[in-house]
Image: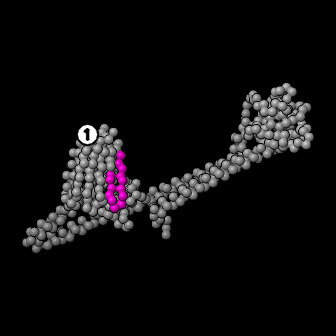
Amino acid sequence: MNSFSIKSSTIRLGIYISSVIIATILVFQLVWLNSVYHSEQKQFKTSVVKAIRGLYEDLDIAMYNYTPLNDLIESPEPNLYIARITPPFVPDTLANYLRYELEDFDVFTDCYLGVYSKDDQKYIYNHVLLFGKDDPTKKWAAPTVHPSYDHISLYFPNRRQYILSQMNFWIISSAVLLVVLLLFGASLYYFYKQKFLNETQKDFIHNFTHEFKTPVSVIKLAADVLKNPSIAQKPEKLSTYAGIVEYQSEYLQKQIEKLLQFAYTESNELHLSREKVNLHELIRESIQNLNPLIVEKNVTLHLRLDAENPELTADKNYLVIVITNLVDNSIKYSRSPEITLTTKNTDHGIEFSVEDNGIGIEKHQLNKIFKKFFRARNGETYAAKGFGIGLSFVKRIVTAHNGKIRVSSAPGQGSVFTIELPNKL
Ligand code: ADP
């Protein structure tokens, strides 16, 4: 099976499954990044504590007998470390040793050092150990956490950024993965859209050939009969066959007009000739146009034209096309058509709906029927003849009038198509 024989519905299923997989991968990626961040935080803490322990050993300033060194160090907040010390010592020497120890344990982020004296009840020394691009003249006041004993405080203002910069590789690789996944999803979606378009266009060509083949064959057969010299002696037969030719050519002409109109409006902008129109009059005019079909299909038609103000600014001809298409579809897709046309005024304009008791449309096809060339199928067959261009054209016209179209339908029960149009364009 080559890749082009995959159906668009299969691709759509593929898209759903891939979306779930992509979402799962993303969630795992986020959870994993979060756990990397926490382990980097832990690592940072361990390194700082080791650096302070190194400092204790370098300067011999932890003379708390029998107290484990770790108990002399605390971190009241993630950026701040407090360590008890025992003077005397030279603060500048302490700062130099601290830098050396921090470097030794790979802590390369700015550190504000403060030395607190319990006798003076204040910080007696402040120093900024710069590793990054921070401002060296920055003033910093260490918080007084333990006024009752001598201690040093180490404050790391850029700790979070530093930890994140340590994770750069993981963040960038996750971002690349995300971009690749999104590109993959987008390509799959694009492929699906192309495939869908291909399928609907193929269907269109199929319907097109079908629509034209039958009348042409009938005309050809009638012409064969009319060619027979004996037909001149049978005026009734002559008239019947001439009638057949006329009926079929009119049908063909209508279909060709429909296609030409579609092709023309597809390649050109819709130019509306705005004028004041009365929607109720247009509805009656459209019904008049459809009268032969209404009689032929024995349609029961109810008119509930309740809008008190049926006046609109709109393009008359285009609105007639909208109404005719909707009513024509209701007749076409109903076995014993009973159709109700309703109008009512809304806050900003007027609402017009066409309700039928026809075959209805399945839920999953509802959002597709306004796409060009799309025709809902019942298994392998279509319910009626058509090209799948009517509703897409209707939607274009309604949108050009700043209106909206919606449909509600249930298979076997019927459909209601409603358009909302503003009074003024
Ligand atoms: P066409 O009728 O030529 O196929 P349309 O664009 O007018 O094209 O309609 C698209 C599809 O929407 C139809 O093929 C049909 O499946 C469905 N449809 C439209 N109107 C109705 C309706 N009133 N009842 C049931 N199905 C409808």
Instruction: Tell me the quarter of the picture where residue 414 sits.
Output: bottom left
The reply to whether residue 293 is visible in this rendering is no
Query: At 80% across and 37% down in the image, what residue appears?
Result: 82
Return the residue found at the far front.
Answer: 148
The image position of residue 223, as x and y in percent, is 18, 68
| Part of the protein shown in magenta | 404-417
Secondary structure found at label 1: loop
Q: Is residue 244 above or below residue 154?
A: below
User: Is label 1 within 8 A of ligand 1 (CB to nearest ligand atom)?
Assistant: no
Name the image colouring: one colour
The amino acid type of the residue labelled 1 equals Asn
Q: Nearer the viewer, residue 102 or 422?
A: 422
The image position of residue 4, as x and y in percent, is 47, 64
Q: Nearer the viewer, residue 323 or 257?
A: 323
Query: At 48% across and 63% down in the image, what residue appears?
Result: 10
The reply to whether residue 224 is visible in this rendering is yes
Judge left or right: residue 174 versus residue 187.
right
Q: Which residue is mark 1?
A: 309
Q: Nearer the viewer, residue 210 or 324?
A: 324
Return the residue found at the far top.
Answer: 120
Instruction: Tell me the quarter of the picture where residue 139 sits.
Output: top right
Q: Magenta region's main secondary structure?
A: strand
Instruction: Tell me the quarter of the picture where residue 108 sits.
Output: top right
Does the magenta segment cover residue 97? no
Tally the numbered discs. Answer: 1
The image position of residue 327, as x and y in percent, is 27, 54
